[in-house]
Image: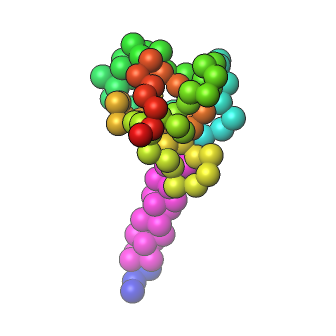
C-alpha cells in the first residue's frame, strides 16, 4: 500500500473513532430533573415534541412507575444504560417516566 493509502486509512479510522465517540455521547448518567441524561442530538423534532407533550423526565417522581417497568420500554445494551421507548424516538432512562406509562404485562 502506498503512503497515500496509509494516510487515507488513518483518516478513515480516525473518522470511525469520532463517530464512535459521538455514539457514546448519547450517554446515560445518573438522571437529574434539571438535565436529561439520556440525550441525543439526532432526535427528530417530532420526537422531541412528543417528549415534551408527554412530560418525559429522566427520573420518575411517581412511586413504582418508571421506564424499566413500563410496557413500552426496551432495555439498553448494558444495565443502567439508556433504553428505547416505542412511544417516541430517542433514548430514555430506565428510571424515567412519562404520561404514557403502562404496566408491563
Ligand atoms: S412510555 Fe413513558 S414511561 Fe413508558 S418507556 Fe416510554 S417514556 Fe418511559
Range covered by the magenta-colored residues? 4-26
Was residue 16 drawn as part of the magenta stretch in this picture? Answer: yes
Q: Nearer the viewer, residue 5 or 39?
A: 39
Say which residue appears at 52% left-offset and 55% top-offset. 77
- As for residue 45 lying within the magenta part, the answer is no
Q: Is residue 30 visible?
A: yes
| Quadrant in which the N terminus appears | bottom left
Using the rendered view, name the quadrant where residue 102 is placed. Answer: top left
Main secondary structure of the magenta stretch:
helix
Q: Residue furthest bottom?
A: 1
Q: Kindly identify the residue that appears in the image at 45 percent across and 58 percent down.
A: 15
Q: Nearer the viewer, residue 40 or 3?
A: 40
Q: Give the x, y percent position of residue 62.
A: 60, 19
Q: Nearer the viewer, residue 90 or 12?
A: 90
Residue 51 visible within the image: no
Q: Residue at x 46, y 60 (%)?
A: 16
Residue 83 at x, y percent in the picture: 49, 43
| Image coords of residue 56 (percent x, y) | 49, 21
Which residue shows up at 46% across the image and 32% down it? Answer: 103
Which quadrant would the C terminus be assigned to in this image? Answer: top left
Q: Quadrant of residue 45?
A: top left
Amino acid at each position: 500500500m502506498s503512503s497515500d493509502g496509509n494516510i487515507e486509512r488513518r483518516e478513515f479510522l480516525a473518522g470511525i473513532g469520532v463517530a464512535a465517540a459521538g455514539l457514546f455521547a448519547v450517554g446515560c448518567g445518573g438522571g437529574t430533573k434539571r438535565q436529561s441524561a439520556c440525550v441525543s442530538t439526532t432526535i427528530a423534532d417530532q420526537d422531541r415534541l412528543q417528549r415534551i407533550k408527554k412530560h418525559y423526565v429522566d427520573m420518575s417522581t411517581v412511586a413504582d412507575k418508571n421506564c424499566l417497568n413500563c410496557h413500552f420500554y426496551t432495555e439498553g445494551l448494558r444495565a443502567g444504560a439508556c433504553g428505547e421507548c416505542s412511544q417516541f424516538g430517542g433514548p430514555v432512562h430506565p428510571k424515567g417516566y412519562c404520561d404514557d406509562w403502562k404496566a408491563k404485562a
